[in-house]
Image (cartoon, rainbow, N blue to C red):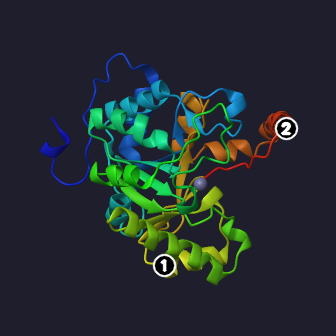
Amino acid sequence: MSAGDRKGSAVGMRPSASGMGPSVRALERICRKRSVVLGYHGVASSRLRDDLSLLQVSPSRFRRHVELLLAAGFSFVTLADLARRAGGGAPEPGLAAVTFDDGMRNNHTTALPILQEYGVPATVYVTIGFIGGVSPWIGPGGDGAMMDEPELRELAAAGWELGAHTMTHPDLSALDHDACLREIEDSRVELERIAGVRVETFAYPFGRYGPAALAAARDAAVIAAVTTGSGSWEPYEITRAMIGAIDPLPVILLKLTDRYEPLLQSPPARLARSASKRLRESFRSRRHSGEPSG
Ligand SMILES: [Zn+2]
């Protein structure tokens, strides 16, 4: 069955669930209960020293995630379609939206062909100032190139949703309402000019926002905004399970069921996390790098 054979916007060719083990059965239970939003940055095989923020998921892992979700029965939609179908609350169960932040070129060269094999659409949140450049968070030996304008138009032509992700990727929680609104609206308008499509949704850089940014997102001409974390279907605070480079499947399952962050707040997890952070900071101190999570 091709994507075109399906009615409506929910698409995806379903691989066989046989031989996929307990993960697919756990996902089937999730699929019966809820919809999910996954957040990625890049799909590439980068070495740790070039990807200290763990933003790049290998192509084989990414393919496995998509195959498992399809085998479990999820239908894939863009974030805008998901928000429309949710109608301001939690959407019907069984929908999945794949999103990418920042606009990395490997979204086009690597993720697009994999998703096209299964007829799965995605949403990419584009930072205007990064177009045609290099990700500030990927090292010189990594796959850090960002898409250029023709590549963005090709994604739109392939059925992907393009979403706004500000002009300069600031921490919006530190800006006032007017500055937030300019970042959101200018990037939406510029992306519409570049791609010739409507831009309907927005992603907060780093997943960070305060009352001013939230009010600005509501005032902007978008129907929904996404952040990181868990537990919200509020239209301008839709949370996403952010998938890191080395997340094993059990961790991804916890993230998809909103049970990961509560576990992170437990004392043993806090200790392990701070030790791991100190280790990565000692690597990172040799060069400038941020800590993006959105
Ligand atoms: Zn970002």
Q: Position of residue 240 (x, y in %)?
A: 53, 52
In the image, what residue occupies the spot 66% across and 69% down?
172
Judging by the rendered image, the residue that carries numbered circle 1 is 220
Question: Image check: 151 left or right of 38?
Answer: left
Judging by the rendered image, the residue that carries numbered circle 2 is 286
Does the rendering let one see residue 230? yes
Q: For the residue marked with disc 1, what is the amino acid?
A: Ala
Q: Is residue 11 above or below residue 45?
A: below
- Could you tell me which secondary element the residue under label 2 belongs to? loop
Q: Is residue 33 above or below residue 21?
A: below
- Could you tell me which secondary element the residue under label 1 belongs to? loop
In the image, what residue occupies the spot 69% across and 42% down?
263
Q: Position of residue 54 (x, y in %)?
A: 65, 36
* Quadrant of the image where one finds ligand 1: bottom right
Mark closest to the chain's N terminus, 1 or 2 = 1
**Measured Cα–Cα span from mark 1 to mark 2:** 39 Å
In the image, what residue occupies the spot 57% across and 38% down?
254
Q: Position of residue 158 (x, y in %)?
A: 28, 48
Q: Position of residue 138 (x, y in %)?
A: 65, 40
Q: For the residue marked with disc 2, what is the amino acid?
A: Arg
